[in-house]
Image (tube, grey):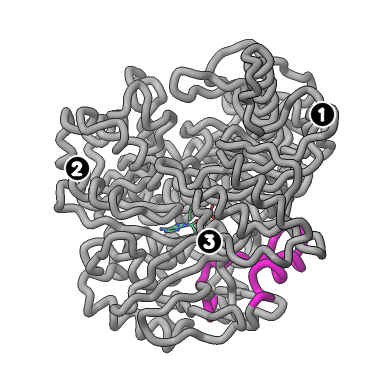
């Protein structure tokens, strides 16, 4: 643990060194790992194309660093402790040796099923150890994993499979989530009707429900594993070979496949896990995210395993069987470092302290937050009732595209300030710019958050469309990586993330594009057009507010959001019923096309949208209406039809 920063002075020195000599700085850290062949050049980059390469010509396999490297000393140490959805089901513990063996076995299974280096494998799985095994086995055979969060719909799944032309799909019969089950295989079967690249489906048996197995295509995980040996020589890959693709929403309708490569991602997730959480060898680390998101990739799987840590994997949800589940598991497993999202904190805070009091929580040393801005109230509640005022809170800012944490306190080292992600980690060079792209220097300022120098785990491309990567992240401001976030730097130089400045929403820490949700709503046969904006939501951080124009036929049926009080009680209640049914249909469609997480919280039926003469929707106005801040709607004179604003305001939800 020679790379662990243990004092604020050391942080300042290390930071300085990392900015003055970035190559030397990362070079030194990269020597920690086992390489099949060392790199010859540390970095080559330009943000114009963009092209970023770290540890050039290095050859390695990341799983040797996650697994084999620890076997000599830590073969019997738990790598994964799994907690079931069912609080009474025993924990499953996989030691480093066992995880290694299972990964090797599944690597053989992948190979037996036609997977070769460079092939794309889609993983659509419950939060069970087999998900981690599948991810690592892909890496071991040199295949590129594309994990799709198991809460996504069949349409989202097939779009992602098609975009990456995945050859194989790993899934399960079903999954448990609170008191519900989800028929995963059925969703896969539906998705596979609109995909042609999948040759094999490997199915893990979790819920035991009857499913359809297509002969020749679908095989069982358990029978394939029985045939496989626990030995598999890790395939040699290049530092810059892709490790995985992870889809994330942007401001256009189609999610993009963010590509991370092997060596840079390895070095950065190792380093940030070690430092931000101040990893100690006897830690029990629990990140509550799903592996379907970047947080799970980097801080359930790769970061912890690269450090030889014990990582908890939880199948269930925070409120099942009750809102004390997180705290019960922390006590049961003696969790020392806990990492969750503000939305979970807010929802558990709302459930009341009676769910916290029964638990000691005295094993906790560090608690973390990720995914969205944490409000002051939630920060203090977390600090007082979970951290018992003795655990530093690490408010970690980063993105799918950054691969790992960029701005965050180092636990116990960086003095914290509620709602501030505080300072950049070593090797991270933030810069604030104004809308003209000019640097906003000094302190006590606000601007668009960019990065002026590459860190090892910056995204390399968006799968199959490099131009999109350039346009989205590298073309707004010359020679800078643009994060899409607005940010304040206070009088102490501390960074506070304000939120997205593009058409990206953050719903319960999940990223969704407005266009993506609008496209789904527009699939309803009676919808003519729609516009979606985010508004502040007590628990979710942001909620979705949809403005929808319906067709003539629907208007005739009374599907209009005007005052229903016509004096005719019967007609009024019928109309309200119609409206409610219609709004539920919209929610169902969005669920089906994207995921239940994308369902609009509020839907307002409107007769038109505020558009400029050039046809651009003025979302600023819609946002104000959704935020219920109608006192100052700004200039509406450039609108094609300013009167539409009055109607929208009058009928606002
Ligand atoms: C966006 C990235 C990084 C893993 C989970 C989300 C927002 C993330 C914070 C934070 C304020 C945050 C930003 C960012 N965000 N962490 N600590 N404070 N905002 O990954 O889905 O790629 O979303 O989440 O707006 O751009 P993601």
Within 10 Å of the Cα at label 2, are there few (<14), some (14-19), or many (20+) other Cα atoms?
A: some
Callout 2: CB less than 8 Å from ligand 1: no
Q: Residue 193 carries which label?
A: 1
Q: What residue sits 63% from the left and 16% below the top? A: 573
Q: For the residues carrying marks 1 and 2, which lies nearer the camera in this image? A: 2
The region drawn magenta spans 451-476
**Any magenta on residue 185?**
no
Q: x and y percent of residue 642 in the render? A: 71, 57
Residue identified by numbered label 2: 385
Q: In which quarter of the image is residue 201?
A: top right
> In 3D space, how far apart are the residues under numbered discs 1 and 2 (Cα atoms)?
49 Å
Looking at the picture, does residue 600 appear above or below residue 458? above
Residue bearing mark 3:
632
Q: Please report contact status of discs 2 and 3: CB closer than 8 Å, yes or no.
A: no
Residue at image location 44% in from the left, 30% down from the top = 315
Number of the front mark, 2 or 3:
3
Image side of residue 327 versus residue 123, left or right = left
- Viewer-nearest of labels 3 and 1? 3
Closest to the observer: 103 or 190? Answer: 190
Local SS, label 2: helix
């Amino acid at each position: 643990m020679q790379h662990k920063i243990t004092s604020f002075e050391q942080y300042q020195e290390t930071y300085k060194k990392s900015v003055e000599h970035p190559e030397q700085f990362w070079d030194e850290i990269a020597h920690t790992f086992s390489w099949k062949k060392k790199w010859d050049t540390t970095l080559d980059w330009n943000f114009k194309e963009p092209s970023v390469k770290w540890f050039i010509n290095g050859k390695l396999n990341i799983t040797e660093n996650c697994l084999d490297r620890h076997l000599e000393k830590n073969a019997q140490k738990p790598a994964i402790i799994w907690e079931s959805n069912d609080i009474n089901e025993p924990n499953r513990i996989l030691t480093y040796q066992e995880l290694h063996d299972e990964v090797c076995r599944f690597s053989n299974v992948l190979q037996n099923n036609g997977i070769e280096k460079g092939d794309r494998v889609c993983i659509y799985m419950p939060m069970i150890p087999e998900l981690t095994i599948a991810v690592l086995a892909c890496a071991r055979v040199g295949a590129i994993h594309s994990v799709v969060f198991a809460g996504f719909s069949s349409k989202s799944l097939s779009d992602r499979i098609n975009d990456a032309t995945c050859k194989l799909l790993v899934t399960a019969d079903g999954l448990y989530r609170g008191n519900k089950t989800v028929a995963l295989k059925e969703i896969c079967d539906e998705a596979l009707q609109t995909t042609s690249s999948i040759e094999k489906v490997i199915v893990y048996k979790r819920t035991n429900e009857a499913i359809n197995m297509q002969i020749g295509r679908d095989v069982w995980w358990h029978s394939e594993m029985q045939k496989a040996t626990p030995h598999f020589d890790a395939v040699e890959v290049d530092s810059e070979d892709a490790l995985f693709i992870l889809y994330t929403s942007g401001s256009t309708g189609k999610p993009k496949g963010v590509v991370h490569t092997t060596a840079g991602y390895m070095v950065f997730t190792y380093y940030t896990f070690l430092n931000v959480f101040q990893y100690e060898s006897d830690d029990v680390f629990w990140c509550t995210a799903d592996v379907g998101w970047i947080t799970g990739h980097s801080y359930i799987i790769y970061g912890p395993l690269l450090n030889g840590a014990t990582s908890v994997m939880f199948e269930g949800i925070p409120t099942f069987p009750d809102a004390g589940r997180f705290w019960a598991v922390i006590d049961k497993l003696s969790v020392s470092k806990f990492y969750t999202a503000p939305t979970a904190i807010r929802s558990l805070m709302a459930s009341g302290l009676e769910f916290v009091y029964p638990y000691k929580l005295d094993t906790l040393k560090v608690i973390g937050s990720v995914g969205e801005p944490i409000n002051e109230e939630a920060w203090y509640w977390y600090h007082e009732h979970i951290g018992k005022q003795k655990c530093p809170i690490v408010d970690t800012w980063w993105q799918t595209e950054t691969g790992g944490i960029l701005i965050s306190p180092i636990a116990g080292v960086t003095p914290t300030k509620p709602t501030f992600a505080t300072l950049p980690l070593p090797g991270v060079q933030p810069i604030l710019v104004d809308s003209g792209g000019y640097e906003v220097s000094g302190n006590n300022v606000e601007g668009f958050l960019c990065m002026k120098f590459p860190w090892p785990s910056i995204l390399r491309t968006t799968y199959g469309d490099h131009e999109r990567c350039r346009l989205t992240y590298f073309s707004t401001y010359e020679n800078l990586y643009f994060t899409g976030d607005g940010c304040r730097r206070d009088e102490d130089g501390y960074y506070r993330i304000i939120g997205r400045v593009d058409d990206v929403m953050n719903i319960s820490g999940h990223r969704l594009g407005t266009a993506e949700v609008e496209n789904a709503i527009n699939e309803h046969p009676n919808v003519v057009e729609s516009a979606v904006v985010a508004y502040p939501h007590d628990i979710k951080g942001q909620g979705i507010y949809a403005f929808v124009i319906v067709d003539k036929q629907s208007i005739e049926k009374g599907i209009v959001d005007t005052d229903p009080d016509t004096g005719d009680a019967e007609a009024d209640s019928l109309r309200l019923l119609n409206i409610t049914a219609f709004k539920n249909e919209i929610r169902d469609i969005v669920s089906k096309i994207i995921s239940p997480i994308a369902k609009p919280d509020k839907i307002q039926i409107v007769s038109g949208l505020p558009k400029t003469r050039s046809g651009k929707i003025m979302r600023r106005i819609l946002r104000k209406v959704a935020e219920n801040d109608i006192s100052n709607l700004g200039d509406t004179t450039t609108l094609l039809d300013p009167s539409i604003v009055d109607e929208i305001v009058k009928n606002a939800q």
